Amino acid sequence: MIAAAVVFAYLAVVLGIGIFGGRSAGHENAEGYFLAGRAIGPVVFLLSLFGTNMTAFSILGASGHAFANGIVTYGLMASSSALVIPVGIFVIGTRLWALGKRHGFMTPVQMFRDRWECGHIGTVIFLVQAVLLIPYIVIAVMGGGTTLRAVSGGLVPYWLGGAIVSMVVMGYVFFGGMRGTAWVNTFQTILFLSFGAIAVAVIARGMGGFGNAIEGLLASPATAPLLTRERVSPLYFFSYTFIPLSSLAFPHIGIFCLTAKRLSHFRRTVVLYPICMFAIWLPSVFLGVVANKAVDLPPIRAKVEARATLATQGPSLTPERRSQLRATASGDDVILKLVEGYAPLWLASLLGAAVMAAVMASDSQILALSTMFTEDVFAFYGGQARFGPSVQVQTGRVFVILLTIVAYAIALTAPQSIFDIASQYAFAGYSALSPLLIAALFWKRSTKWGALAVSLWTAASVLGIAVLQWAVPAPAPGAAVTVWAVGGVDVITRIAAGTTVLGLLPVVPMTLVSALLMFVVSSVTQGSRPSPSTRLRYNV
Amino acid sequence: MALITAFVYVLHQDFWFWRTARPLVFGFLPIGLAYHAAYTVGISLLMLYLVRRHWPAHLEDASERVGECGGATPRAKK
């Protein structure tokens, strides 16, 4: 119950920070509410931008992935993001900021409409972006319900936990707008950064030092490969470097780039971003790996045994038994179990709060969707001109409430596995949308038809992969099911972790085809190029 | 700038530590993980270099507002 009390206290603090942190902003117009008046300071800009990119996956999923796959997790997800995201912010984010400030853009779609002199194609881009964002919001509600139920020992049921978390997030986004959300993200990032170091120190002491644990893992043929990358092909490893491209195309990241008060705020952000990645991901991944040696803890022993059963008897088991074992072997709560086993109660309670912070990362997406709806739909189709800026802000707030209610209703009725798949491929979808942003900012010959082709291709490919993964169940770990082969070469293969195309993750062909479509379709539709005056305005 | 960034990107594909865990850095960190941890810190130095030598300072001047092209107006402009 102490853990539950700490989590509830944390929720109250977050609500307070969001509401009171946002009070100083001028909420009478859209720019004040949705972009904090383009006046976020350097420290909040760095910590909040980083926090916006850190989802539940970064804290819990990373250690869970490392528990099952070993140290490769860090190279797959952390060091590649640590390069691609800061370089992207340096090259794209700064330019987006300058153009946004110069022309008054508040969303990427506004810029696309202006850049390519298009209206309804912008609406198509809005729809694709919105559909790809919604799974995150639903999953956050599900995560909130599950976490509150777990930390309260079942006293808070799933439906109530989801409702409480939704209300808290909705509360500070509704009242605090961008400034309130940025302050909450800053607070959460500080919590993550502090927790990593403390957790490592306490767990190391509990396990009798990490040196012994690592030597023990190396001594066993079953666990030694977790300390190398021999189970992963270089092609698969290379594929993952395409995933961070999604961060550049996420509307909540693009919109957040517009909130900086000065260009110089980006300087510290791009330099320190990799250090923040290091500080959060290294402990998460390392603890996930060494958890394999913590078999004196019964919950972790059960996970290791379930994984061993899957590996040895997987193909002969029924699909139901396989999915049951997969659920037991899942390592998403492995850090929780380590801290419960080795840390004092006060630290375990703080961990509950940190986990809560991770699953509440949907605030930026909710605010971004609200901004996009009010700017890209309400204002664009004449709402602002007819009703004024004050009504526009109120519309945004009503949208926040409606979105929260819809997400909550879906979270109560839909199975989580569907949204796990959807969010998994939303990353690939946003990576495939990144050529849109790059072409708009850097390629003068790009046209609106190229933009439409990229958007439709992204929607079709994400849908296609989701259907494929639903229709072809995941095989046992280590096994592969050929879905499509040409001349003896496996083109599409279903594996336990998802799908591969010629050995690559789908994100690679999706992004490359997107870039190709932008080039080819724009080249054959040069008659639709924007006017010279428009192109000149983007020549900064 | 593009060449240096591309070179650092290539360094991410470190096939040379693919199948070995030893030496253990500080007695507990497998070399593959230690390499990527050091690589992450190295990127911070790369960014420091880019910020000092290739900072797009002209964008500060380019950001001076010239008018509203936001969602309220583009339709009217068409």
Image (spheres, rainbow, N blue to C red):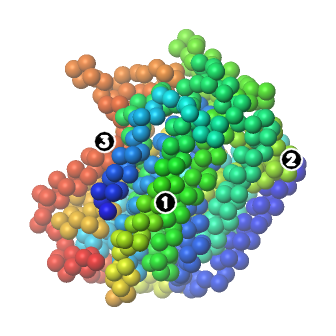
Tell me the residue at 37%/27% (across/down). Answer: A493
| A408 sits to left or right of A242 | right
The percent position of residue A221, horizontal first and vertical second, equals 59, 18
Residue A509: numbered disc: 3
Q: Is residue A276 visible?
A: yes
Residue A14: numbered disc: none
Q: B38 above or below A272? A: above
Of badges 2 and 1, the one in the foreground is 1
Mark 2: secondary structure:
helix
Amino acid of disc 2: Leu
- What residue is shown with label 1? B44
Tell me the residue at 28%/50% (across/down). Answer: A514
The percent position of residue A314, horizontal first and vertical second, equals 56, 16
Callout 2–callout 1 Cβ contact below 8 Å: no
- What residue is shown with label 2? A345
Q: Quadrant of residue A289?
A: top right
Amino acid of disc 1: Ser
> Residues at marks 3 and 1, common chain?
no
Comparing A535 with B75, the one in front is A535
Q: A388 above or below B37? A: below
Tell me the residue at 48%/86% (across/down). Answer: A388
- Mark 2 chain: A
Q: A122 above or below B27? A: below
- Mark 3 chain: A
Of badges 3 and 2, the one in the foreground is 2
Rounded to the nearest angstrom, the CA distance separating label 2 from label 1 is 36 Å
